[in-house]
Image: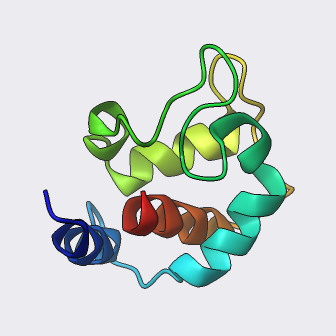
Amino acid sequence: MPKMRRIILGAVGVLVLVEGAWAADPFNGARIYNKHCVSCHGANGRAEMAATPDFKAGAQTFLKTDKQLLDIIKNGKSIMPGYRGMLTDAEMLDSIAHIRTFF
């Protein structure tokens, strides 16, 4: 899929959630991703650790809804810690927007 089409589809996907439309900021999400996620998920979405989802391989991550991803970020999964109490829901949604838009 051409990169621009992926960016547009990712940006649209960020706005449509199961419960309704929420606006998220992928640029703020980049700041959050670089602070909390990059050491395991990599600067370009390529996993740096074993058993860590590779966002460039995409399908498994991008088939999940924003709500499913939000729950994973809040509560953790497998080796990933939960970020409940460290990040707000809005910051978590911003990081999801970053992943969907730029990876």
How many numbered badges does the structure rendering display? 0
Q: Quadrant of residue 39?
A: top right
The type of colouring in the image is rainbow
Residue 44 locus on image (x, y percent): 56, 52
Residue 18 locus on image (x, y percent): 26, 60
Vertical position of residue 87 compared to residue 49: above or below: below
Residue 38 locus on image (x, y percent): 73, 48
Q: Quadrant of residue 34?
A: bottom right
Q: Nearer the viewer, residue 27 or 72?
A: 27
Quarter of the image for the C terminus: give it.
bottom left
User: For this view, does 72 lie left or right of residue 1?
Assistant: right
Q: Is residue 84 visible?
A: no
Q: Is residue 21 visible?
A: yes
Residue plotted at (63% across, 62% down): 92
User: For this view, does 50 lie left or right of residue 2?
Assistant: right
Residue plotted at (57% across, 38% down): 72
Residue 6 locus on image (x, y percent): 23, 65
Q: Quadrant of residue 64?
A: top left
Quarter of the image for the N terminus: give it.
bottom left
